[in-house]
Amino acid sequence: MRRKYQGNESVKRAQLQALRREFEVLEMKNGESVTDYISRVMLVANNMRNLGEDMKDVKIVEKVLRTLNEKFNYIVCSIEESMDIDVLFVDELQSSLVVHEQKFRRSSNGDEQVLKATVEIERGRNNYRGRGRNSYRGRGRGRQSFNRATIECFNCHKLGHFQSECPS
């Protein structure tokens, strides 16, 4: 039964090598939550354990702390200073990181609202056409539509033409 479902030793060794490589290159993606990232790490670690690898919690905790996003750097430092990594369980680490992640989200929501308002103002001013043809390049006023009947000449002060077109 064991040979049928797990394969022979060479197959197990090849699978374990692939899982070791996957475990080594795992990193937290931008925008990924702590829970999702730790779930990915635990999936690979549990697969390695099932194939006979000795995966201790210390190794997983160190991996997670080493590969978190840069925004978690100061939290990682505080966890390493205040807790003993050798006896820290993955669940304890995850709960601590989730609390900090929730604080990030609460504080960054205000920033997103400000950013969103700024983008809306920019879109209103420049009609938000983007780059390329018909885009606002910042030089001159471009082509604007206006009613010539309301234009006053600087030379003769009559309506309907510019100074450069003035007949007098």
Image (cartoon, rainbow, N blue to C red):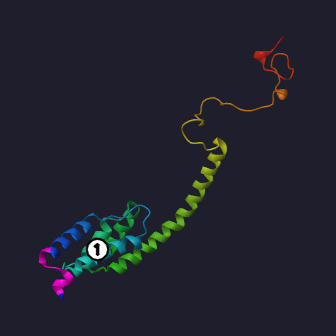
Q: Which residue is farthest bottom?
A: 1
Left/right placement of residue 77 relative to residue 50 reads right
Quarter of the image holding residue 22?
A: bottom left
41 or 84, which is in the foreground? 41
Instruction: Locate the N terminus by quadrant.
Output: bottom left
Name the residue that disc number 1 marks. 44
Q: Main secondary structure of the magenta part?
A: helix
Q: Residue at x 23, y 81 (%)?
A: 50
Residue 125, above or below 100: above
Q: Which residue is farthest top?
A: 168
Residue 5 appears at what percent x and percent y? Answer: 21, 83
Residue 115 appears at what percent x and percent y? Answer: 57, 54
First to last magenta residue range: 2-10
For label 1, the crowd category at 10 Å Cα-Cα, with few meaning under 14, some 14 to 19 and many 20 or more, is: some
Residue 7 sits inside the magenta stretch: yes
Amino acid type assigned to the residue bearing label 1 in the image: Val
